[in-house]
Amino acid sequence: MQRKHTLFALAALAAVATTGLVTGCASRPTPADLDAQALAMIKASFRDQGIAKVDRLNQDLGQAACSADKPPSDDVALRVEAEALASIRWPAGGQYIGDWREGEKLAQNGRGMTWTDSSAAPSANGAQCYNCHQIGKQEISFGTIGPSLYNYGKMRGVKDVADPDSAPIVQYTWGKLWNSKAYAACSNMPRFGHARLLDEQQLRHLMALLLDPKSPVNQ
Amino acid sequence: MKPFSWIVTALALAVSVGAPAQQKSAADGIAEYRRMLEDGNPAELFEAKGEDLWKTARGPKKATLQRCDLGLGPGVVKGAWVQMPRWFADTQRVQDLESRLLTCMETLQGFDAAEIAKTGFDKGEQATLAALAAWISAESRGQKLALPQAHAEEKRFFELGKRAFFFRGGPMDFSCASCHGEAGKRIRLQDLPDLTKNPGDGIGFAAWPAYRVSSGEMWSMQRRLNDCYRQQRFPYPGFASDVTIALGVYMGVNAQGAKSIAPALKR
């Protein structure tokens, strides 16, 4: 008898809870509802313009995982990083280093990929580096979103880029430029190789800017 | 010589004069430049034009905008700007200043709102909107942002705006938060306000519309957001589209209590 009563009370409670939930839904959308509504709103609000098409709103795993005010869970972050690491294409013939002078020009150049740019080809793009990083000491107009890269190679003990001792930092730097998300799932840095923003030769020039002992960055 | 190109020269001078070897934020130069100009913000020219346009009978219906309801009742302009975007019962929408002006220009004056929304910035009736926004925001100068959040749709738009703010996309993986999610950051020498909280009086949402010295143009908040998205490498946001209005709610509510200096003067 007592058990019956309890069951009845539970059922009544459940009914109240369900009703409450339904009413709650009608008056206030759940976070998941809002996620879906925001996505629909974003898709409906943009249109193609020049090279900037609406397919730029289609998020991949990492973009979706890093689109909240909180970072993703550890296992999602690890998945993003693993995918990014697997995406890295290492340079043809093991040639990592180009000309730091060309690298400096690219680092200064903040152009490319907007709807007012006529071409999305890497040759039309700058590397944007000074927008966010200090690099060469002589350039005082630098951003602070990323860490300072002044003395990048020197501080890491690179005396000869061809020395096998330098290989780990040389490879890490290439990987970071190719797909920054390999080492930090929600890095603010664009994926210059992976997103085809820069080609291999341009990346080699940036590598030289950062790692060549003769580069002003390492003086 | 471009009109106002002297201003660019003055700004360059203001920045260079006080900037020796040490790193210096552009804000110092801008502040110095503001002091040099004192009461001479070219935005005033647009304010005067906007006030005139508000009171002039125009459009197919040859009517003024003096019965336009910006949220505080028909024709009330003072204080309206610092309470927008907000919910409007007649349109059943949350609207920012520009989308509300489109409604008024359509219903009162007989203009085609969709046509104006499709028009390029500074062309045709878009120039009208920019001038109106300059004047209307000036009528709330010095007032504190006080966006209403009582209506369920206003709350919902805040939540949608927050999600849009953090939405990463495009070839460079940028969101609004990439640049405006942390205090004390810069792009080159340009200070970046943290728009996820109140960045302070006259900063961020409390500074637009503004006169842009570098381009010699009057920019409404809609245009400011449009250029943010261009630099984010996103596709093109529709003028007065929901994403732009939701972002306005998010930034405005975050900056609640900040004093508006619009129309401000920007580099």
Image (cartoon, rainbow, N blue to C red):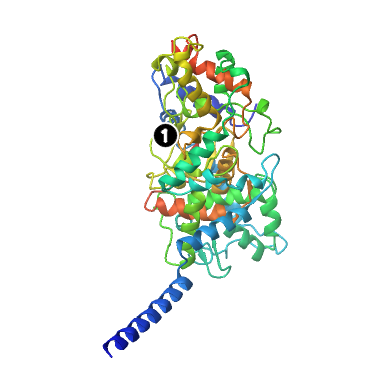
Q: Is residue B66 found left or right of A119 in the rendered image?
A: left
Residue ID at (42%, 55%): B253
Residue closer to the observer: B154 or A203: A203
Is residue A32 placed above or below B244 in the rendered structure?
below
* Three-letter amino acid code of the residue under disc 1: Lys
Q: Secondary structure at mark 1?
A: strand
Q: Is residue A208 found left or right of B235 in the rendered image?
A: left
In this orientation, does residue A105 appear?
Answer: no
Q: Residue furthest left?
A: A2
Residue closer to the observer: B192 or A2: A2
Q: Is residue B125 found left or right of A61 in the rendered image?
A: right
Position in image of residue A30 (x %, y %)? 46, 64
The quarter holding residue B109 reads bottom right
Identify residue for label 1.
Answer: B185
Position in image of residue B194 (x %, y %)? 41, 42
> Quadrant location of the N terminus of chain B?
top right
Position in image of residue B221 (x %, y %)? 54, 48
Residue ID at (58%, 22%): A203
Position in image of residue A169 (x %, y %)? 46, 21
In this orientation, does residue B106 appear?
Answer: yes
Is residue B87 placed above or below A173 in the rendered structure?
below
Residue closer to the observer: A73 or B202: A73
Q: Residue furthest right?
A: B60
User: What is the total number of numbered labels drawn onto the structure image?
Assistant: 1
